[in-house]
């Protein structure tokens, strides 16, 4: 089972490298799960490729989330979980952003389902998604100050 | 209520606030509806009223302490939430769970799916004006909750699935209890269908309402019964089996109409499939055998061992004071909850507390499709659409 998953992941890596040699900057295989690290500038183009290349066919964006690696820089790490329903495959895309310039291309033009997932990350981590048509706070009230899921935001008490 | 002039000038629309206390929003969902007469021009769901910051709280808890928080997200599927979190931590640790524990997990999670679908069916029928069905559904759900109470001592917030296995040995007499339920249930499902499926009012309220093409549902990241009612047989139990689902014989019910009625039929068919899985899981479970993995330092030792072996006592102390430290790395695990793909993302930095725990909540993602479903429909159909998306606000807001 795991070997099959690896073979499927290798196809993705190969296809992406053939498309653009710079698209894959690192491949992390961990417990049968493959993560492809993508440069920030190439994120949307790579996602587009993942969706539209018929050999990859990742039609469903299942999840998007962020990890704060404070005090490392660039500390914010975005993780996208892609699913190909026809091929029965999964892959993760990852890219890093710094808090000085927290801007990433929105994936809404590729998968409209990225809408609320990106709004949630904007709300809780303060990452701006370039090209998102409706970037407002989602879970927290509009006047809230700060981004609670960043590691330097306290879990208890006042900020 | 306010009246606003649109840019065009001639046409007048009204903005109506629905919720957050509206009973058929199933919790605290607020929807801003822009109406032209009785037709919905556009809608904007406002969420966050139940946001409790569970993901933030996880930062300050050890891996085992987080399990109790997961119960409180999707409160109609607490065992499913326990399962996805435990599977993610087990993947991080590379821990193998004994088969017996895996089968009992499957059995409990499928019972949970039935109970969740029963609550959905009962409350949705209530929204549509068929009150009696709610009483029948809650009557059967009670039997499932009694089984959970026997297993875990709790009816809802069970926290019964733990890292590496289960919290306790299954209780005496559990087999008879589950068997009684399995024998009772199929005719009861027939009764629900007799009340609803051919009912003209039920059909009139649901047929052709809330249609979205399958391509659009996939693009909007919808999963679960909503997607399967559009003819896409995507189910994590089949596509990416976990917890030994590959050993079970069941089908994934689908429809092609993609309207509210098709979603109802898919859920009722899923109750029947889940009953099959529960029976198989019960038969596969042996009476003897371990119910949790053997991993000293991660899983609390048995009481007798603690009193006779010094290492066991030390491990017990360390697990409950400091916790255990999985190796650094990130995992994402997805299971099929009654509402769709429930995912758990954990990033570990090698310390006893997780760096980040994120839950991919199916209700949250599926709710995005609401504005597209209700556009151009009647205001009464908004209730039908919210109902058949099957949201749990605890899951949406976390």
Image: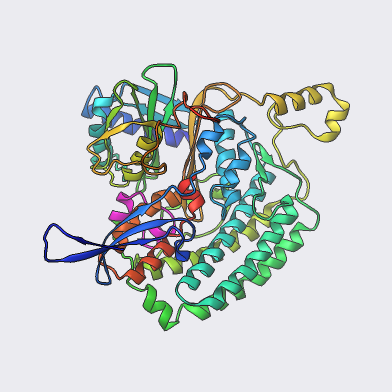
On screen, residue B371 versus residue B134, left or right, reads: left
Asked if residue B250 lies in the magenta stretch, the reply is no
Front residue of this view, candidates B2 and B128: B2
Q: Nearer the viewer, residue B97 or B355?
A: B355
Front residue of this view, candidates B15 and A18? B15
Q: Is residue B244 above or below residue A17?
A: below
> Residue lying furthest right in this view?
B308
Q: Position of residue B361 (x, y in %)?
A: 46, 46
Q: In which quadrant of the rendered view does residue A64 lie?
A: top left
Question: In the displayed structure, does residue A145 sit left or right of residue B177?
Answer: left
Q: Residue furthest front?
A: B2
B332, above or below A42, in the image? below
Where in the figure is residue B306, as x and y percent of width and height? 83, 29
Q: Is residue B228 magenta?
A: yes
- Left or right of residue B347: residue A99: left
Residue shown at the point (40%, 68%) measured from the top left: B384
Give the residue at x 71% y 59%. B147
Task: Where is residue B396? Give x, y as percent.
Answer: 46, 49
Way the structure is coloured: rainbow
Instruction: Please determine whether, in this image, residue B363 is positioned above or below residue A26.
Output: below
The residue range painted magenta reads: B216-233
Name the residue at the top extreme.
A72
Query: Does residue A21 appear in the picture of this structure?
Result: yes
Residue B296 visible in the shown view: no
From the viewer's perspective, is A21 left or right of B218?
left
Is A125 situated above or below B27?
above
The picture places residue B21, in percent across and down from the top left corner, at 46, 60
């Amino acid at each position: 089972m795991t070997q099959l998953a690896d073979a499927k992941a290798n196809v993705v890596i190969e296809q992406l490298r053939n498309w653009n040699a710079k698209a894959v900057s690192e491949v992390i295989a961990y417990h049968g799960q493959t993560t492809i690290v993508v440069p920030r500038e190439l994120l949307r183009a790579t996602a587009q490729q993942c969706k539209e290349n018929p050999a990859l066919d990742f039609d469903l964006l299942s999840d998007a989330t962020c990890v704060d690696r404070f005090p490392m820089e660039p500390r914010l790490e975005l993780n996208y979980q892609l699913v190909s329903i026809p091929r029965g495959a999964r892959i993760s895309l990852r890219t890093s952003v710094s808090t000085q310039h927290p801007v990433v291309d929105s994936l809404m033009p590729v998968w409209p389902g990225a809408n609320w997932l990106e709004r949630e990350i904007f709300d809780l981590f303060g990452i701006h998604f370039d090209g998102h048509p409706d970037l407002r706070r989602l879970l927290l009230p509009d006047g809230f100050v700060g981004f609670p899921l960043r590691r330097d935001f306290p879990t208890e008490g006042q900020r | 209520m306010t009246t606003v002039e649109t840019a065009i000038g001639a046409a007048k629309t009204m903005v109506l606030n629905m919720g957050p206390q509206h009973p058929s929003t199933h919790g605290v969902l607020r929807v801003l509806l822009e109406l032209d007469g009785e037709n919905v021009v556009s809608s904007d769901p406002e969420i966050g009223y139940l946001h409790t910051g569970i993901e933030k709280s996880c930062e300050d808890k050890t891996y085992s302490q987080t399990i109790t928080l997961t119960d409180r997200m999707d409160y109609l599927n607490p065992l499913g939430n326990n399962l996805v979190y435990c599977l993610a931590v087990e993947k991080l640790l590379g821990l193998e769970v004994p088969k017996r524990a895996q089968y009992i997990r499957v059995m409990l999670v499928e019972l949970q799916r039935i109970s969740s679908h029963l609550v959905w069916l009962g409350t949705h029928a209530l929204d549509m004006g068929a009150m009696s069905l709610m009483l029948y559904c809650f009557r059967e759900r009670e039997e499932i909750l009694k089984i959970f109470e026997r297993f875990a001592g709790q009816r809802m917030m069970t926290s019964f699935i733990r890292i590496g296995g289960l919290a306790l040995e299954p209780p005496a007499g559990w087999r008879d209890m589950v068997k009684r339920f399995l024998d009772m249930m199929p005719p009861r499902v027939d009764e629900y269908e007799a009340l609803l499926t051919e009912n003209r009012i039920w059909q009139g309220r649901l047929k052709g309402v809330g249609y979205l093409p399958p391509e659009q549902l996939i693009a909007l990241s919808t999963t679960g019964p909503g997607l399967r009612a559009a003819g896409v047989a995507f189910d994590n139990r089949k596509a990416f089996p976990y917890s030994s689902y590959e050993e079970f014989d069941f089908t994934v019910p689908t429809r092609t109409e993609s309207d509210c009625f098709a979603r109802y039929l898919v859920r009722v068919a899923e109750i029947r499939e889940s009953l099959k899985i529960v029976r198989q899981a019960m038969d596969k479970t042996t009476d003897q055998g371990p119910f949790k993995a053997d991993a000293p330092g991660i899983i609390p030792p048995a009481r007798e061992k603690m009193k006779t072996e010094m290492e066991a006592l030390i491990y017990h102390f360390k697990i409950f004071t400091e916790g255990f430290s999985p190796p650094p790395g990130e995992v994402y695990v997805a299971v099929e909850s009654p509402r769709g793909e429930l995912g758990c993302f954990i990033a570990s930095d090698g310390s006893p507390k997780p760096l980040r725990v994120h839950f991919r909540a199916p209700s949250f993602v599926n709710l995005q499709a609401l504005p597209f479903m209700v556009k151009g429909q009647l205001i009464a159909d908004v209730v039908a659409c919210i109902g058949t998306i099957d949201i749990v606000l605890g899951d949406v807001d976390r």
